[in-house]
Amino acid sequence: MAVQLALRDIRKSFPVKTGRVDVLGGLSFDIYERDFVSIIGPSGCGKTTVFNVIAGLLEPDEGEIEYRGERVDGLRGKVGYMMQRDLLLPWRTVLQNVLIGPELAKMPLGEARDMAMEYLNTYGLAGFENAYPRMLSGGMRQRVALIRTLINDPDIILLDEPFSALDYQTRLYLEGVLMEAVETFNKTVVLVTHDIDEAVALSKRVVVLGGRPSHVKKIYDIDINARTPIGARSDPNFAGYFHALCGELDIQTEVA
């Protein structure tokens, strides 16, 4: 499978009062075309910093990023970035929030509106296009945020714990919406999550980070045939991966 994105010996530190804190200590891993990779690790190990480097929001102190074989400084214009908070603009309607990307790209208004309405219809938000964010549930707001990410047609979607603030039922539903969108639009996805259950259910591969400065501790290929979040959790291989990843993070999974 062709490598779409390669990180090579990425190092990053940040200034503090006493000097500098090393966060990334030489990360190297590959992301393939149409991959779904989850990045897990202990709190504070630099998972979000990795995202910001990939997106071009931070420059690494050392190391290289290669995109489809060519060295790049970042992937601005090639990635969609969805965070834990939906970051919808409260003074704009659902439709107006979805149209932010096309507006910035100067897409003709009629074409952009038709495309946005198609997305809203597909993901169950028809009839809410004129609603404001305060009128929506948390799950609906995250659907709008996902549509706002997809409508820009990014090559790679970066997801920074997008469902962690939602109840479990809503999370399962939105995981399903995400997986359907990934398959429909042939997207590559990189997910940062603290939820090992979610990482196993959604991913083709899981990158485990450890230490500070962080390094790649291990990469797991996830061999689960089911491609739905609930189906994956019922797969006979699910428990083995779950316990192995808990072990990597020193999480105890047995009740005394």
Image (cartoon, rainbow, N blue to C red):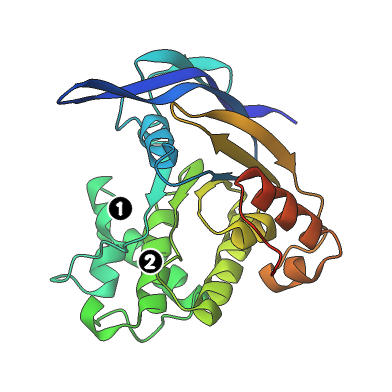
View extreme (right): residue: 236
Secondary structure, mark 1, is helix
Residue at x 34%, y 30% (from the top left corner): 56
Type of residue at label 2?
Answer: Ala
Nearer-the-camera pick, 200 or 239: 239
Q: Would residue 241 appear left or right of 170 to someone viewing this image?
A: right
In the rendered image, the vertical position of residue 42 relative to residue 29, given as above or below: below
Q: Quadrant of the N terminus?
A: top right
Q: Position of residue 108 (x, y in %)?
A: 28, 54
Residue at x 24%, y 53% (from the top left corner): 103
In the rendered image, the vertical position of residue 230 relative to residue 23, given as above or below: below
Type of residue at label 1?
Answer: Pro
Q: Would residue 89 appear left or right of 169 to someone viewing this image?
A: left
**Residue 59 numbered tag:** none
Examine the rendering and report whether any part of residue 131 can be seen: yes
**Residue 116 numbered tag:** 2
Q: How many marks?
A: 2
Residue at x 58%, y 17% (from the top left corner): 69
> Which residue is tagged 1?
102
